[in-house]
Image (tube, rainbow, N blue to C red):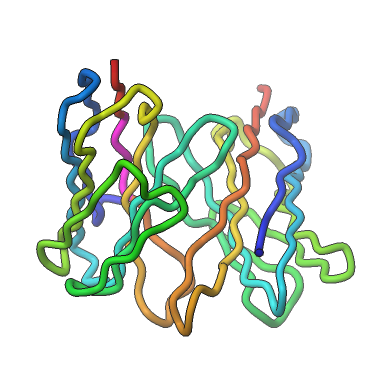
Amino acid sequence: AQSVAQPEDQVNVAEGNPLTVKCTYSVSGNPYLFWYVQYPNRGLQFLLKYITGDNLVKGSYGFEAEFNKSQTSFHLKKPSALVSDSALYFCAVRDFWMDSSYKLIFGSGTRLLVRP
Amino acid sequence: DADVTQTPRNRITKTGKRIMLECSQTKGHDRMYWYRQDPGLGLQLIYYSFDVKDINKGEISDGYSVSRQAQAKFSLSLESAIPNQTALYFCATGLAGVHEQFFGPGTRLTVL
């Protein structure tokens, strides 16, 4: 079965410093990987996805993610963190489920706290 | 995402009560999903629907039922609520050929 793991419950970083939120995956076949962000009292917002192509994927709000097949990782990164980036981040993998149907398998989430 | 709305946003109910959570979307998507979020567990799929006549159980469907009244509406019911159904519930939409899903703002449900 497909799965994703987010090994850190919380990541703390100072504003202006680079940030990394880690995600590893386990899939059979080619992975379809996603990052979502959840702000307080809001739904999940799509940040970026990897389907195929370049290993470095650029997304919304200056975020990017690096797909590493050999390490089965899809870490979320940003060169310079903002206090407003503080939120809950979810990694997800697409799980094919009978023909063309599919669902998203989510990690447990990582809380990012950016200090002023 | 304002294109996916959920009502109510917050609900407190008592054990044994029937409750319905509603989801509407103006995105024109054919696929709709219900997830629940518990702290430290990420999101778990309850039910999903690929069109009005297609309803499928997810990972944790026990104790829940759904109705797809129209392409734009997908409701989740708890026939007899129990305290361990206290959670944050999200509706999401999707489109064939588009890989990501789009989420509503969530409904916080508390069962006393």
The percent coordinates of residue B83 (x first, y second) are 35, 22
Q: Quadrant of the C terminus of chain A?
A: top right
Q: Which residue appears at 70% of the width and 60% of the height?
A: A65
**Most distant residue in the left direction:** B69
Q: Which residue appears at 60% of the width and 30% of the height?
A: A83
Q: Which residue appears at 17% of the width and 57% of the height?
A: B67
Q: Main secondary structure of the magenta part?
A: loop
- Count of marks overlaid on the render: 0
The percent coordinates of residue B23 (x first, y second) are 20, 50
Q: Quadrant of the N terminus of chain A?
A: bottom right
The percent coordinates of residue B3 (x first, y second) are 24, 56
Per the rendered image, the range of residues in magenta is B104-108
| Front one among B107 and A65 | B107
| Front one among B16 and B13 | B16
Left or right of B10? Residue A91 is: right
| Front one among A78 and A94 | A94
Q: Is residue A13 above or below residue A102?
A: above
**Most distant residue in the right direction:** A70
| Quarter of image, res B80 | top left
Q: Which residue appears at 41% of the width and 57% of the height?
A: B58
| Front one among A82 and A99 | A99
Left or right of B82? Residue A48 is: right
Q: Is residue B34 above or below residue B21?
A: below
Q: Is residue A15 magenta?
A: no
Q: Is residue B107 magenta?
A: yes
